[in-house]
Image (cartoon, rainbow, N blue to C red):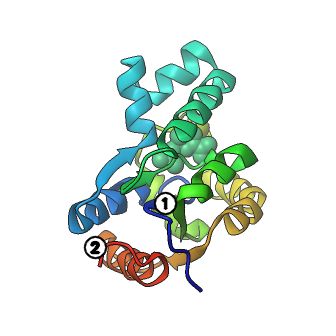
Amino acid sequence: MTHSGLTNLVLIGFMGAGKSTVARICARRLGMTLCDTDHILETRFQASITQVFAQLGEKEFRRQETNLVQELSTGSRQVIATGGGVVMNPMNVAALRATGLVILLNADTDTIVERVRHQTHRPLLMGVTDLPTHIASLLAQRTPAYREAAHCTVEIRGLTAAESAANVINLFKTISGEGK
Ligand code: S3P
C-alpha cells in the first residue's frame, strides 16, 4: 500500500491517546512543522479550549476547527495533531486525507481513563462522575469514524509516547515514502 504525495502526517484518536505529545516527537525527528489544532485555536482565541467552549459554545468551536483543518490541509510537511472530535465531520476527514497520511492512535477505555483521570482541561469530560462509563460510551460512538478516517493504526496500549512515535514514524516512512 503506497500513498505517495501525502506529505502531511495527521494524528487522530480519542482524548488522552497522546496525539499532541507523539506529534511533537514525530515533528522533531522528521524535521517537519508541528501543527496542533487545539493549541493553534487557543492562540487564536487567546483562551483555553474550555473557555472557548464556555464562551462561544461547541458549535462555534467546531466551525473554527473545520476552518483550521481546511487551512492546514493546503500545507505540506506538517505533523498535524487533531482534537479528538475532528473525525466526526466528514469534511474534516476528506481535507486531512487529501494531503496527509492519517494515523489513528488507538487506545482502549482503561488506558484513556487512566490518562485523563487527573486532567481538568477537557470540556467534554468536565463534571462527569462515572468517567469509565462515559468514556466507554463516547469511544464506542466514535470508533467507527476513527477507523474509517485512518489510513492505518498504532495501538498505544502499554507503549510510551516515544515508542508510539517510533511506530508512527515507521508507518509514515514506509507508506507515504516521505521523511526518508
Ligand atoms: C475534543 C477533544 C479535545 C478538544 C476538545 C474536544 C473531543 O482534544 O479538541 O476538548 O471532542 O474529543 P484532545 O483530543 O486533544 O483532548
Q: Return the residue found at the far front.
A: 5
Regarding residue 89, the answer to whether it shows in the image is no
Q: Is residue 94 above or below residue 162?
A: above
Quadrant assignment for ligand 1: top right
89 displayed left or right of 62: right
Q: Can you give x and y, in whole percent of width and height, for residue 161 in the image?
A: 32, 69
Identify the mark at residue 91; answer none if there is no mark. Answer: none
Q: Can you give x and y, in whole percent of width and height, for residue 171 in the image?
A: 44, 80
| Amino acid type, mark 1 | Leu
Rendered residue at 69%/69% (across/down)? 147
Q: Quadrant of residue 174?
A: bottom left
Q: Can you give x and y, in whole percent of width and height, for residue 56 in the image?
A: 59, 15
Q: Can you give x and y, in whole percent of width and height, for residue 66 in the image?
A: 61, 35
**Dot 1 corresponds to which residue?**
11
| SS for callout 1 | strand
Which one is in front in this view, the residue at disc 1 or the one at disc 2? Answer: 1
